[in-house]
Image (spheres, rainbow, N blue to C red):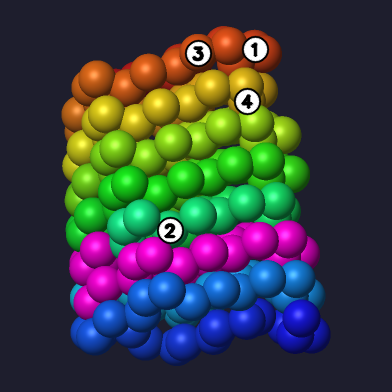
Amino acid sequence: DNQFSGFSIQYFTGGTLSDNAANNNGDDGFFFFTFDGGTMSGNTATSNDDAGFGAGDFYGGTISSNAFTSNNDGFVVGTVGGGTITGNTLTNNYEHGFYVTGDFNGGTISDNTSTSNGKDGFYVYTFNNGTISDNEASDNLHGFYLFDVNGGTTSNNTSNENHLGGFWFGDIS
């Protein structure tokens, strides 16, 4: 119930952030200018006016087993350049469950579940390198929406009962 973010960290380069709740905030539940190491796990972010999790850049570390529910976006990051995002649940967010607004240049997004979001379960603007695997998207507008694909690997993802399509790829080069 803060005017801005529940947790706001400029540079997260190590350590552990676990078992916290960030709910009903005027901005993001958890916000990081740069996430470049360490572990974030077992946290919940619910009913935040912006994202449950927001970061300018994600370059390394692990984000696992968190729940992002009923936020504007569940998980939004500008650039992904490494690290692992796994085992998170993104449910009933107003726009996207998982949203990369810029470049995905490396790292792994795996074993996440994105359900009943207003737009896309998983949206990546530019997919250059890295892995998106073993994720599940259901009851979203699109399950997986990769706008500009220049490389990387997508495998073993499941898309069920999404309104406009399971997998949508824009330009593939």
Q: Percent position (x, y) of residue 132?
A: 28, 35
Per the picture, the main secondary structure of the magenta-coloured stretch is: strand
Residue type, label 1: Leu
Q: Say above or below: 99 vs 115.
A: below
Residues at marks 2 and 4 touching, judged by CB atoms closer than 8 Å: no
Q: Say above or below: 108 vs 64.
A: above
Magenta extent: 38-62
Q: Say above or below: 100 vs 42.
A: above
Which is more N-terminal, label 1 or label 2?
A: 2
How far is disc 2 from disc 3 in space, using C-alphas?
22 Å
Residue 119: which quarter of the image?
A: top right
Residue type, label 3: Asn
Query: Where does label 3 land, which residue?
Result: 160
Which is more N-terminal, label 3 or label 4?
A: 4
Query: Where does label 1 land, which residue?
Result: 164
Looking at the image, residue 52 sits to the left or right of residue 65; the answer is: right
Q: Nearer the viewer, mark 2 or mark 4?
A: 2
Residue type, label 4: Asn
Helix, strand or loop under label 3 = strand
Query: Where does label 2 land, which residue?
Result: 66
Q: Percent position (x, y) of residue 122?
A: 48, 35
Q: Which mark is residue 115?
A: none
Q: Residue at x 72, y 34 (%)?
A: 118
Q: Percent position (x, y) of residue 125?
A: 47, 40
How far is disc 1 from disc 3 in space, using C-alphas?
11 Å
Which is more N-terminal, label 4 or label 2?
A: 2
Query: Where does label 4 land, which residue?
Result: 140
Pick the quarter of the image with the C terminus: top left
Q: Nearer the viewer, mark 1 or mark 3?
A: 3
Which is more N-terminal, label 4 or label 1?
A: 4
Residue type, label 2: Asn
